[in-house]
Amino acid sequence: MKEPVSILIVEDERIIAIDIANTLRRLGYSVTAEASRGDEALEIVARKKPDLVLMDILLKGEMDGIECASIIDEKYKIPVVYLTAHQDNATIEKTKSTNPYGFISKPLDERDLNICIKNAMYRHDSEIKYQDIKEKYFRLTENARDMVYRYSLTDKRFEYINKSSVNITGFSPEEFYKEAEPVIKYINLSGFSYDQNSITISDAFSHRGSEYRVTDKNGNSKWLFQKSVIISDDSGSPVAIEGIVSDISQRKAYEQQITEANNQLHSLAGYIEKIREEERLAISREIHDQLGQDLTVMKVDVYLLSKKALDENALEDRVEISRDFQLIGDKINETIDKVRKISSDLRPDLLDRLGLIEAIEWHISEFEKRTGIQCNFENNMPEVEFSEKISVQIFRILQELLTNVTRHSKADEVDISLRLKDGNFEMHFKDNGIGITEEQIAEKSSLGIMGLKERVYLQDGKIEISGSKGKGTSIRISIPFEFKI
């Protein structure tokens, strides 16, 4: 059951105070106490915290009712209803600063008293709820990560801005309040104009919002996103703009990275296709220029030999025919060797028959013979069993590294070392060529480096590339894998 409203009566006329108390009890209210002086009333308020105070304006003593009510309003926020026998304008004007909740004329009318108290309590409850809501939303806006603002179009100044303005713009709310001109650029008013006949607004005031770029107080470039509404008065004229501004720089950076990654993928796909075509062309030439010519020569030799065998004097030329068969046999062996070489260039059979390390040693040896570049190979690997997937990828990585040496480095010596460390396969590759700069490593158009990185990343590996101009290039690759010793 709800407790009755407790009321303190402050009245210096004892008989009037008793009459008011009896009236209040008949109306169902609780009388907290009766006081005849201001200091006595303040002591009771501090101790008993009544719900409402009925205050006589003219009290005897050093403190009148107006001064006492002012202290109660400021310190305790308890509603005060004045009791007065004189409702002259001068007296009413004095009470305004005390936030009065009503006036009751003496002698009191029971009905008017009841209505006045109910109105005072309703207003007080409404103000408490309003203040609670106000504080709640103030906390929400103050703790929001986005910048929340209200900008007056009539006064050309910011009426409110939360503390997130510091993170987003570098300017404090106080700087926004002090002078709007330097900081107005941080809200997007472009496209907004107003006259008596029309309003033109930008996307910032639509459901889509708008994105724009600014430089904050500290010189950092940022992307901001704003959604705003125009606040109008009763006549429909715009008076303010309220909005939220978000820092979307990170999102924009991600979008840029995704765009660049897509572009790189397109470039890499084109690069890979180009390499494939070059390999196909090289294989085609080898087949045409070597195998084709050899087979043509053997075809002619077989044809001539068959004619010679049909000759009546062939029996006398058995020695010569035998020599021709021997030459054709030698040519067939040469052709078989060339087929094996082409096949080995595509995928060494050593990789399948003997394993990764032997295939690497064979490829390095062939590379030295073909290019004249000295290769110092150091194998610190224990006996391990590589999976087919890792074997192929490591072999292709080595091929790519050696190919880059012949294409770009202008080196005449290469150091290659292999080892196992902490469950990872590690390859250290170093040449003595012209070197590579940090800019070249970071260059997004370096498709050879990009392709090499992709091979390593596909194996969840890591690659470190370093170098300096004129001092060669060093590459360290680490690939995790399960193995058996």
Image (cartoon, grey):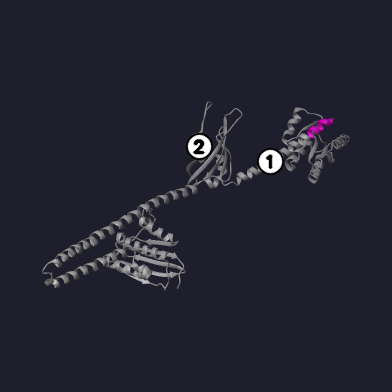
Q: Taking the image as drawn, is residue 472 in sight?
A: no
Q: Position of residue 366 (x, y in %)?
A: 29, 67
Q: Position of residue 62 (x, y in %)?
A: 80, 38
- Amino acid residing under circle 2: Asp
Residue, disc 1? 131
**Which disc number belongs to residue 46?**
none
Image quadrant in which the C terminus is located: bottom left
Along the viewing direction, whichever of 459 and 321 lies nearer the viewer: 321
Image quadrant in which the N terminus is located: top right
Along the viewing direction, whichever of 288 and 189 lies nearer the viewer: 288
Residue, disc 2? 203
Helix, strand or loop at mark 2: helix
Left or right: where does residue 52 sit relative to residue 352? right
Residue range highlighted in magenta? 105-117
Q: Taking the image as drawn, is residue 167 in sight?
A: yes
Along the viewing direction, whichever of 26 and 300 lies nearer the viewer: 300
Say whether disc 1 or disc 2 marks the residue closer to the N-terminus.
1
Outermost residue, top side: 197
Q: Badge 2, how many Cα within 10 Å: few under 14, some, many 20+?
A: some
Q: Residue 113 lies in magenta, yes or no?
A: yes
Left or right: where does residue 323 sit relative to residue 236? left
